[in-house]
Image (tube, rainbow, N blue to C red):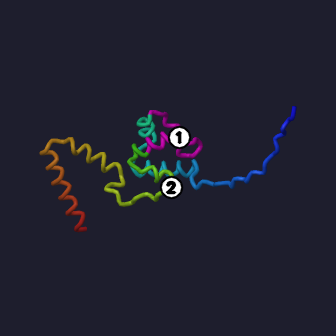
């Protein structure tokens, strides 16, 4: 019986690749975007169905954010996933950068027509006065 001995082949070594994306920078971007959109960690946690402390750990970069959670965060915060990953810089030309305005507009939209008209008149008067200063 002839035994064939496995001879180690000299294989080319793979180079090391260092990704520009790490858990801490993703967490930092998450925190920045969350604050910009005026969400609390608790609000984000409720929408994701997780505990607030987990959102905190994501932001600190102590826990890796699963891809499916990143997709959920992008949807909740109305932000392209590319921005969390640092592939594309954040757009500064959005309609409203501050989520508080959007929330108020949503509440205004639910008002009766007359209440909306009165509010618009009040806002217009205020803006006209502020522009004169």
| Residue for point 58% across, 41% down | 63
Residue 1 position, x and y percent, is 87, 31
Q: Is residue 116 left or right of residue 89?
A: left
Taking depth in this image into account, of 111 and 77 the one nearest to the observer is 77
Could you say whether the residue bearing mark 2 is in a helix, strand or loop?
loop
Magenta highlight: main SS: helix
Residue 30 position, x and y percent, is 48, 48
Question: Which span is picked out in magenta?
Answer: 49-73
For disc 1, the neighbor class at 10 Å (few under 14, some 14 to 19, many from 20) is few
Q: Residue furthest bottom?
A: 132
| Residue for point 48% across, 40% down | 69
In the rendered image, which residue does mark 1 sit on? 66
Q: Residue furthest front?
A: 1
- On the rendered image, what quadrant is the C terminus found in? bottom left
To which quarter of the image does residue 6 belong?
top right
Residue 90 position, x and y percent, is 43, 57
Q: Is residue 57 left or right of residue 124?
A: right
| Residue for point 30% across, 48% down | 102
Mark closest to the chain's N terminus, 2 or 1: 1
For disc 2, the neighbor class at 10 Å (few under 14, some 14 to 19, many from 20) is some
Taking depth in this image into account, of 48 and 126 the one nearest to the observer is 48
Taking depth in this image into account, of 100 and 45 the one nearest to the observer is 45
Tell me, yes or no, whether the highlighted magenta stretch contains residue 72. Answer: yes
Tell me, yes or no, whether the highlighted magenta stretch contains residue 52. Answer: yes
Residue 20 position, x and y percent, is 58, 55
Alpha carbon of mark 2 to alpha carbon of mark 1: how far? Answer: 16 Å
Q: Is residue 106 left or right of residue 84?
A: left
**Vertical comparison of 83 with 4: above or below:** below
Could you say whether the residue bearing mark 1 is in a helix, strand or loop?
loop
In the rendered image, which residue does mark 2 sit on? 86
Tell me if label 2 and label 1 are in contact, CB under 8 Å: no
Q: How many marks?
A: 2
């Amino acid at each position: 019986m002839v035994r064939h001995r496995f001879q180690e082949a000299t294989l080319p070594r793979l180079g090391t690749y260092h990704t520009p994306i790490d858990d801490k920078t993703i967490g930092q971007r998450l925190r920045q975007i969350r604050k910009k959109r005026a969400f609390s960690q608790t609000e984000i946690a409720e929408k994701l169905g997780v505990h607030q402390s987990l959102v905190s750990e994501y932001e600190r970069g102590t826990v890796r954010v699963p891809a499916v959670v990143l997709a959920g965060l992008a949807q909740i915060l109305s932000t392209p996933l590319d921005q969390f990953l640092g592939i594309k810089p954040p757009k500064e030309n959005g309609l409203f950068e501050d989520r508080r305005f959007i929330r108020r507009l949503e509440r205004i939209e639910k008002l009766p027509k007359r209440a909306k008209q009165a509010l618009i008149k009040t806002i217009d008067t205020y803006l006209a006065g502020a522009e004169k200063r």
